[in-house]
Amino acid sequence: MSLIQHRIDGFRTGGSATLTVRDPATEKAVGEVALAGEEEVGAAVAAAARAFDAWQDVSQARRARIMFAFRDLLERHEDELARLVTAEHGKVLDDARGEIVRGREAVEFACGIPQQLKGEYSDQVSAGVDAYSFRQPLGVCAGVVPFNFPVMVPLWMHPIAIACGNAFVLKPSERVPSASNLIADLYAEAGLPDGVFNVVHGDRRAVDALITHPDVAAVSFVGSTPVARHVHAAATRAGKRVQALGGAKNHAVVLPDADLDLAAAQITAAAYGSAGQRCMAVSVAVAVGEAADPLVERLASRARALRVGPGADPGSEMGPLIGDDARTRVVAHVDAAEAAGAEVVVDGRGLPGPGFYVGPCLLDGVSTAMAAYREEIFGPVLIVLRADSLDEAVALVNANPYGNGTAIFTSSGEAARHFQRRVHVGMIGVNVPIPAPMAFYSFGGWKASLFGDAHVHGPEGVRFYTRAKAITTRWPRSPAGSAPAAAPSAGELAFPTAT
């Protein structure tokens, strides 16, 4: 088996401990990944700090050209990256390619960084005085990312941070390490100087060492809510900027006037794609009024028809879960809901191995008191709640502690507008089940789905990875020049005001 090493300052570096990486479709070992401790994390941060000294002074045009080259390399290596993702994550190849394309959109946004970093200028704010502002990079930035999107989620972070003039240390999930190493190789091929982008693999030890390191200025995180809360608290205590995106319980509200065939098709794809292992997966369908029974019938028919198998098999529509722990957790939630009175309309438990498989599960008759509703299952489980009205459905969405994404299926513009203004959720789809915004907007939720003020990528990403300077200038008389029209002859003790 190959040893998957760190990438620090342009070099491959091992470590004293390793972890076995397994193919979820077969349960077979596909490699050993080095695990970083404080020493390896410290080396990566030191390399990034050294590289930052020169990188921050590289012209914006040069940074943009490197991003253009990196973007082209991502496109050329799309199949190779997708195969790595499928081998370690288990998702089907088309899904893996899809996440690479969505991640590449963030790189395309970063290619326009000179436009994003333009400051402001005001002439003659006072007599003989001008004012302007510009933004500068922070220094060393860190990213800690989950297993479910090994390419896309990191690409929401480091291209923008690097294009803004920062250096970056990425800690990918130790379950899916290989794609991040290939990304490091592509950066080098694009012309990025050594040390500007570094990869350290590891578990919680590496995370804690990275997010509290004194030379790390900002931390970006995506993962579960308990870990997001921990990362936000620990990094904030250490004086860092933090954007920490947590878990989700995304609702899709279906009104009686909706196209139920379209709604069922879209919700099925959003619920079971990537085996439900998406922070934007639809895990709750809220059927309003008379839509309920026909919607459940359509959802059940589509769920039963899904083909479950290895991600590398062209005939598969849904792959396995990431590991045995995930499979055990998902089955336990379905068992508990059934014991509490829910109807298991479609039962994906008990699929034969090898592989960490659970088929699509559809639960009806679920109450908001059940753990299957209250907790993020992160698996191929769709539950159905029933509401008598749109306002009751909105109240259900708002009462949930998560606020990542939601959707409404309707043919009424009035209902859609009411919904989008009343729900307490960061990202909303109208007849779109996974409303992940394009890269020129920003991605982020509300409530327990986000800790910190800033969303990722897009304009908020630029603001997160930079800080502003405001400059006020006056040019008084010089021996060889003439004085401005109203140059003061002496300083004033009173607080200055515009004149």
Image (cartoon, helix red, strand yellow):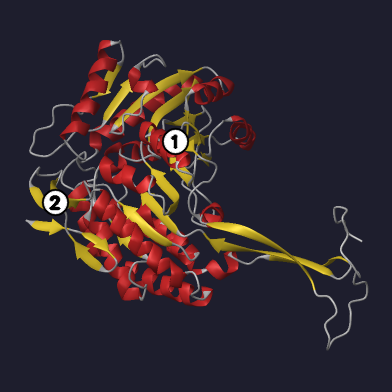
User: Between 130 and 156, which is closer to the camera in this rendering?
Assistant: 130
How far apart marks 2 and 1 lie (CA) works out to: 29 Å
Structural crowding at the residue carrying mark 1, measured as other residues with C-alpha within 10 Å and reported as few (<14), some (14–19) or many (≥20)? some
User: Between 290 and 44, which is closer to the camera in this rendering?
Assistant: 44
Residue 483, label in figure: none
Q: Is residue 31 visible?
A: yes
Percent of width and height locating residue 177: 23, 53
Structural crowding at the residue carrying mark 2, measured as other residues with C-alpha within 10 Å and reported as few (<14), some (14–19) or many (≥20)? few
The quadrant in which residue 415 appears is top right
Identify which amino acid the numbered label 2 is placed on: Ser
Q: Which residue occupies the extreme bottom position in the image? A: 480
Percent of width and height locating residue 28: 7, 46
The quadrant in which residue 292 appears is top left
- Dot 1: element: helix
Percent of width and height locating residue 482: 88, 84
> Mark 2 = which residue?
16
* Rendered residue at 85%/79% (across/down): 477
The reply, left or right, for residue 476 in relation to residue 380 is: right
- Dot 2: element: loop
Determine whether 371 is above or below 303 in the image: above
Q: Is residue 262 visible?
A: no
* Quarter of the figure that contains the C terminus: bottom right
> Mark 1 = which residue?
233
Determine whether 485 is above or below 364 in the image: below
* Rendered residue at 10%/52% (across/down): 30
Percent of width and height locating residue 237: 46, 38
The reply, left or right, for residue 230 in relation to residue 174 is: right
